Image (cartoon, rainbow, N blue to C red):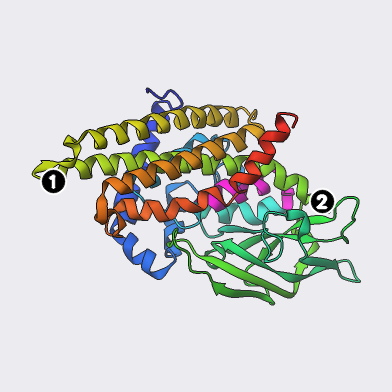
Amino acid sequence: MKRTVYDEDHEAFRSMIREFVAKEVVPHYEEWEERGIVPRELFHKLGDLGVTGFGIPEEYGGPGETGYKYQAIITEESARAAIMLGHYGLSTGMVLPYLLTLATEEQKRRWFPGIVSGDLMLCIAMTEPGAGSDLAGIRTKAELSADGRHYVLNGAKTFISGARNSELCVVVARTAPADPEDRRGGLSLLVVPTDSEGFGYGRKLQKIGLRSSDTNELSFTNVKVPVENLLGEEGNAFAYLGRNLVRERLAVGVDATARAAAAIEFTKAYVRERTVFGKPVTAFQNTKFVLAECSTEVEAAQSLVDRGIELEETGELTPADAARIKLFGTEVCGRVIDKCLQLHGGYGYMLEYPIARLYADVRVNRIYGGSSEVMKTIIAKDLGL
């Protein structure tokens, strides 16, 4: 179906990103996957391209208000090439919005120019070994010093993407004791430089997919965080997280749908070339029917995603609708890529083929940003159930 979500300016931007990915990423991607991390220089190149500071006002060197569509295009072009730009999407699309809405004037002057240039990359530390999706169960503590000049941060986090390639980490910490009557209260956001004394890296976790993006365990041992690095109001982190998770869940849905569409294109090319029993695989009715089913599912998911992109642009995307987009998009993606891999036969299991990389990369889409089960809970509440 014809998409109407993008205009000529968006498509010109798409051409630029496609060229950048083909030149700067694809030739090196296999090496980056083997290393388990992209080079830090990649983010400086993205800064030079002008795409690390979306939404940052011009007075700080940014492009001003640009809308989410440009970020969606970068996601789609990355999917088209079956690559990942490290944790770029997380830094720019998921963490930066916290600073855009919550940073003080002083914080903006201190951080925004570096974010625009690519000198400052961002990560966020929410998940803890014992808490998982239960953010209200966070135990990492930040206690105000006696002189009131800094917080003393202690605790541990896990599954933190991009921490080794970030200069600033937004840490969710408990600044007040947990109240049994209000488990969501008492949590705050602290912006912690990753070179702070006591900021420790644990294992770099080995994943089955997304291998070019580092995922880490973190520890905080008496880390001194200046009170000037408190983001927003003390005790309001849970509300901030809930608000920003809408964008994150839309982004996951955009990525999942784009990777499912890419899988179909890779598979079409493969089945046209591959010969079985003297015929191209595309000649068999099963091949045609499977791809027809996949195409129909992706078109349905794309329509939902595009509607979500439009609503995000106008500030009307609700948490429940973002949950629907993530749930449907990721479930469709899982089914489609599985079917496409099957059409590759044994070669689909070989990492030299993009379909194998896609298969491993997308499995986490149904887990991070809130699992499919969490999405169903949010949707059910929206239905009044």
Q: Secondary structure at mark 1?
A: strand
Locate the C terminus by quadrant. top right
Q: Quadrant of residue 277?
A: top left
- Assess whether residue 156 is covered by the magenta stretch: no
In the rendered structure, the answer to whether residue 83 lies left or right of residue 196 reads left
How many residues crowd mark 2 within 10 Å: few (<14), some (14–19), many (20+)?
A: many
Rendering coords of residue 91 (x, y %): 56, 53
Q: In the image, what residue occupies the spot 54% across and 62% down?
A: 162
Q: Which mark is residue 184?
A: 2
Instruction: Evaluate whether residue 71 shows in this view.
Output: no
Mark positioned earlier in the residue sequence (2 or 1): 2
Find residue 117 and report its horizontal and vertical position in percent: 51, 54
Q: Is residue 93 magenta?
A: yes
Residue 53 lies left or right of residue 343; in this view the side is right
Q: Nearer the viewer, residue 327 or 246?
A: 327
Task: Count the marks.
Answer: 2
Name the residue at 32% across, 30% down: 292
Vertical relation: 175 (above or below) 96: below
Magenta residues, dominant SS class: helix
Residue of label 1: 275
- Residue at the location (32% across, 63% down)? 30
Front: mark 2 or 1:
1
Whether residue 36 is visible here, answered yes or no, is yes
Magenta stretch, residue numbers: 89-106
Q: Secondary structure at mark 2?
A: loop
